[in-house]
């Protein structure tokens, strides 16, 4: 009987244990994910926890870096849910997007390569897998602007050959601090340099304000162990210091808790680390001459529009099928009248609702708001733009030259996949590849190109710096013939550059236009200019004048082949417009005052005729009635 | 969308009426079109004799010229606007817009001059009604005969061409916001639709009268 009772108790306890655990783990919202209604921001005085979930003691000589997964996640926030958010969920195949967006750009002038890369398979870009770029290689190139999690954390995505490197570097967990740390000493550039050194598990901690970090995991041997110094005996420690993190003890209280200056309302500067852009014109080094977005100047933060829930699915400023409320945070959502619902949803955050006096409605059908309101005022020649993720802005030791590669042209008014004209940034992809049976060009693995093609080309990246290198036809032929002889793929070797696909036929370099005939472009939305500086403020002639930059801007084609020469195409090409037609149409604006005058005069004449004969008719009818009254039926 | 549906319905119904009317009055649509273009050809061929005409002949020539060219321009504007807006459901743009805005001021001018030249002769009189009161019957209701109908169509055309023009001209000044612009565009479109229907009626009535005269 006693045994039976004990058995029931043990069974009940086991059930209770399993039930409560499954409850905790199946929770969508952890304690910190749900607000009690107070608008007060909670103070984050926390125990730091390492990757094993142990509380960190700052006095520990071999203190491990704190883990965001265990410090921020675990009990307080749903780390798994957050890690599926927009900034992290790169490998999620359900999010494959045909819409072109800002790619990661692999640039190497010594191999004549400019390749748009995207895990989300945006049309015209390639995935790291297609370039045989392992996650570690991807992180080395682009990790400084990657917020961690997902591809840098999932074992299933690791390259087996990199297994030991991952053991040394540790996982790059979702770094909550890169966005949420409002401490002015939080250092994104330090995070970036640690990613380059493969200090993945230290990166978040190393960039916070209460630690000091030295070391370079990429220089450590594959069997490196933090607790076993014999593993670093063979390393020259004058140049390659083993990773060592020291916590600033004065920042910890008696319970080993440390204060994080975290903010739900992300400071703009934190967004700027990855999302800065600057026009590479004469003002590039004079910050005081460069304007900021009108919304920020009005007191808004980036996250006032680019909001998200606990799932961290960011609102991107466009209508999004996933987030049903996304329309309210588009330009139209805030700035146009809402005629569909009785409950007004427009005018959010005091957004002015423009009248757009005299602007024909076709403009709103054919143009995005950003066309007139965003970017720099259009000029005849395109400008280059420098952006954080392509030009490594904000990092230590970044090349500050205005013509640093990749050359991204900005302010190209282009018809989007949705049929609206919008300002876009543009690159001209350039890469070595092979043509498959369907005629599509696929790039060769980056490593292969670096090892086999770079020596043949013999290009010096420092020579003529700023000008994209061009090589002779004979050199291209020689490389393509070498590739053909190597028989590395079944397809025919090709070289894609300047919107053309080059291949060798009977020892002659031939070319044809291909998928990149208009380059690779992606929309830009900021900076938004004040309304008084919007296109059209001077009248129709801002765009509808002969040779206006809107339609006739010269867009340079950057090609690596010498014989193609320096080419440019008209901006009209990107709009599916014809420049000659646009010139004719612009010419009609010269006669527009005449047209107005003639139509006004004609309408006046017709009105006078109608009124005149109307009264004449009334007079005739009244005299007719008079005649009838008199009994005269003949007249 | 509503405009597209209404346009197709009303223009379709008008054309249906025209076919039946043509059949009833023993003329064909092709005859009607040929007659219009033949008149135009003859008129243009006759321009060189204009100097030798007497004053009354010159006036008649001018009246005919303004009438036929106004109709031709109206046809051009109808085609250039209806193809994109009704057939494809698009806004007027591209080459169609270019044709439309080029023809528009000439059409407006020719219509205004035509109105001056024709309005006098298109005044209603007792011959335009088929049941005027008589000594035996003082009952009176407005029933137009074919001549009267043709005059009514003319006056309606002149009347509805005014909102057509005013709506488009107001669109070109910075007076109305987006909602106002859309409203003006609707006025322009529906006025144009009414004018198209009136022109179909006019063509039928004029052809029938020509046929009966011949």
Image (cartoon, coloured by chain):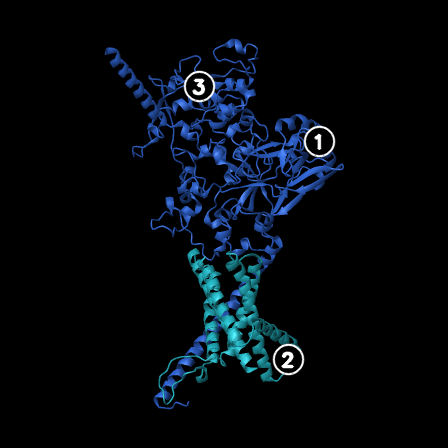
Query: Drawn colour of chain B?
Result: cyan
Which label lies toward us, 2 or 1? Answer: 1
User: Disc 3 vs disc 2: Cβ atoms closer than 8 Å?
Assistant: no
Does A556 appear above or below B66? above
Q: Position of residue A603 (x, y in %)?
A: 48, 70
Query: What residue did someone put label 3 on?
Result: A65
Indicate the quadrant where residue A40 lies. top left
Q: State the residue lying farthest toward the top.
A: A230
Secondary structure found at label 2:
helix
User: Disc 2 vs disc 1: Cβ atoms closer than 8 Å?
Assistant: no
Q: Position of residue A157 (x, y in %)?
A: 51, 25
Residue at 71 percent of width and 38 percent of height: A562
Secondary structure found at label 1:
helix
Instruction: Name the side, left or right, on which A178 lies relative to A35.
Output: right
Q: Chain of mark 1?
A: A
Indicate the quadrant where residue A16 lies. top left
Does A215 appear above or below B85? above
Q: Chain of mark 3?
A: A
Separation of residues labelled 1 and 3 (CA atoms): 50 Å
Q: Please report whichever mark, 1 or 3, sits nearer to the chain's N-terminal start.
A: 3
| Residue A181 visible in rendering | no
Separation of residues labelled 2 and 1 (CA atoms): 79 Å
Query: What residue did someone put label 1 on?
Result: A484
Residue at 53 percent of width and 75 percent of height: B114
Q: Which chain is blue?
A: A
Instruction: Name the side, left or right, on which A555 lies relative to A181.
Output: right
Using the image, tell me which numbered label, if any, was put on residue B3. Answer: none
Around disc 1, counting alpha carbons within 10 Å, would you say few (fewer than 14), some (14 to 19), or many (20 or more)? Answer: some
């Amino acid at each position: 009987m006693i045994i039976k009772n004990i058995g029931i108790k043990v069974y009940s306890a086991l059930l209770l244990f399993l039930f409560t655990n499954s409850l905790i783990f199946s929770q969508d919202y952890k304690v910190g994910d749900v607000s009690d209604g107070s608008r007060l921001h909670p103070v984050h005085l926390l125990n730091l926890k390492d990757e094993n979930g142990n509380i960190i003691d700052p006095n520990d000589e071999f203190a491990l870096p704190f883990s965001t997964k265990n410090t921020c996640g675990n009990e307080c926030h749903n780390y798994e849910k957050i890690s599926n958010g927009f900034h992290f969920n790169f490998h999620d195949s359900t999010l494959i997007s045909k819409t072109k967006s800002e790619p990661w750009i692999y640039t190497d002038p010594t191999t004549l390569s400019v390749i748009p890369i995207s895990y989300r398979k945006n049309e015209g870009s390639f995935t790291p897998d297609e370039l045989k770029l392992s996650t570690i290689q991807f992180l080395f190139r682009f990790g400084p602007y990657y917020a961690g999690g997902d591809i840098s954390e999932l074992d299933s995505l690791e390259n087996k050959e990199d297994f030991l490197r991952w053991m040394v570097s540790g996982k790059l967990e979702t770094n909550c601090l890169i966005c949420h740390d409002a401490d002015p000493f939080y250092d994104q550039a330090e995070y970036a340099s640690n990613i380059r050194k493969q200090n993945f598990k230290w990166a978040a901690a190393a960039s916070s304000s209460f630690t000091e970090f030295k070391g370079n995991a990429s220089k450590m041997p594959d069997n490196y162990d933090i607790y076993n110094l014999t593993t670093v005996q063979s390393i020259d420690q004058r140049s390659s210091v083993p990773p060592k993190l020291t916590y600033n003890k004065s920042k910890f209280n008696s319970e080993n808790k440390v204060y994080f200056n975290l903010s739900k309302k992300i400071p703009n500067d934190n967004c700027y680390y990855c999302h800065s852009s600057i026009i590479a014109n004469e003002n590039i080094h004079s910050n005081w001459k460069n304007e900021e977005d009108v919304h920020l100047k009005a007191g808004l933060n980036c996250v006032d529009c680019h909001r998200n829930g606990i799932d961290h699915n960011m609102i991107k400023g466009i209508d999004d099928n996933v987030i049903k409320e996304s329309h309210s945070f588009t330009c139209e959502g805030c700035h146009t009248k809402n005629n569909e619902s009785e409950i007004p949803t427009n005018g959010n955050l005091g957004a002015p609702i423009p009248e757009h006096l005299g602007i024909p409605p076709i403009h709103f059908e054919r143009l995005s708001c950003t066309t007139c309101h965003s970017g720099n005022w259009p000029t005849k020649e395109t400008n280059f733009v420098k952006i954080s993720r392509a030009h490594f802005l904000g990092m230590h030791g970044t090349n500050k030259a205005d013509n640093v590669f990749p050359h991204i042209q900005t302010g190209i008014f282009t018809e989007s996949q949705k049929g609206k004209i919008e300002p876009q940034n543009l690159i001209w992809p350039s890469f070595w590849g092979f043509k498959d049976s369907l005629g599509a060009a696929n790039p060769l693995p980056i490593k292969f190109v670096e090892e086999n093609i770079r020596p043949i080309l013999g290009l010096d990246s420092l020579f003529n710096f700023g000008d994209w290198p061009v090589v002779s036809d004979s050199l291209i032929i020689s490389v393509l013939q070498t590739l053909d002889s190597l028989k590395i793929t079944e397809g025919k070797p090709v070289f894609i550059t300047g919107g053309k696909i080059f291949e060798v036929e009977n020892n002659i370099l031939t070319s044809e236009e291909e998928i990149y005939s208009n380059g690779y472009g992606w929309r830009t939305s900021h900076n938004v200019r004040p309304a008084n500086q919007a296109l059209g403020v001077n009248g129709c002639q801002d765009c509808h004048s002969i040779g206006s930059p809107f339609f006739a801007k010269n867009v340079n084609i950057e090609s690596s082949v010498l014989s193609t020469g320096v080419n440019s195409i008209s901006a009209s090409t990107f709009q599916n417009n014809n420049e000659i037609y646009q010139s004719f149409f612009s010419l009609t604006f010269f006669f527009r005052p005449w047209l107005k005058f003639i139509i006004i005069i004609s309408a006046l004449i017709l009105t006078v005729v109608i009124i005149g004969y109307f009264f004449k008719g009334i007079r005739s009818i009244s005299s007719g009635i008079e005649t009838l009254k008199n009994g005269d039926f003949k007249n | 969308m509503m405009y597209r549906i209404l346009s197709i319905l009303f223009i379709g119904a008008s054309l249906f009426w025209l076919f039946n009317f043509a059949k009833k009055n023993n003329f064909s649509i092709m005859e009607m079109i040929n007659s219009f273009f033949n008149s135009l050809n003859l008129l243009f061929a006759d321009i060189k004799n204009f100097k030798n005409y007497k004053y009354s002949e010159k006036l008649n020539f001018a009246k005919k010229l303004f009438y036929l060219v106004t109709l031709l321009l109206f046809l051009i504007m109808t085609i250039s606007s209806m193809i994109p807006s009704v057939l494809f459901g698009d806004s007027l743009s591209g080459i169609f817009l270019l044709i439309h805005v080029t023809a528009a001021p000439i059409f407006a001018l020719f219509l205004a001059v035509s109105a001056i030249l024709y309005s006098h002769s298109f005044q209603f009189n007792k011959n335009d009604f088929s049941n005027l009161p008589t000594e035996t019957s003082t009952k009176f209701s407005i029933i137009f005969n074919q001549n009267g109908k043709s005059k009514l169509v003319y006056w309606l055309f002149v009347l509805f061409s005014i909102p057509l023009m005013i709506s488009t001209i107001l669109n070109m000044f910075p007076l109305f916001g987006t909602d106002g612009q859309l409203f003006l565009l609707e006025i322009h479109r529906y006025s144009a639709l009414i004018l198209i229907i009136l022109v179909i009626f006019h063509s039928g009535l004029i052809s029938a009268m020509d046929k009966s005269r011949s």
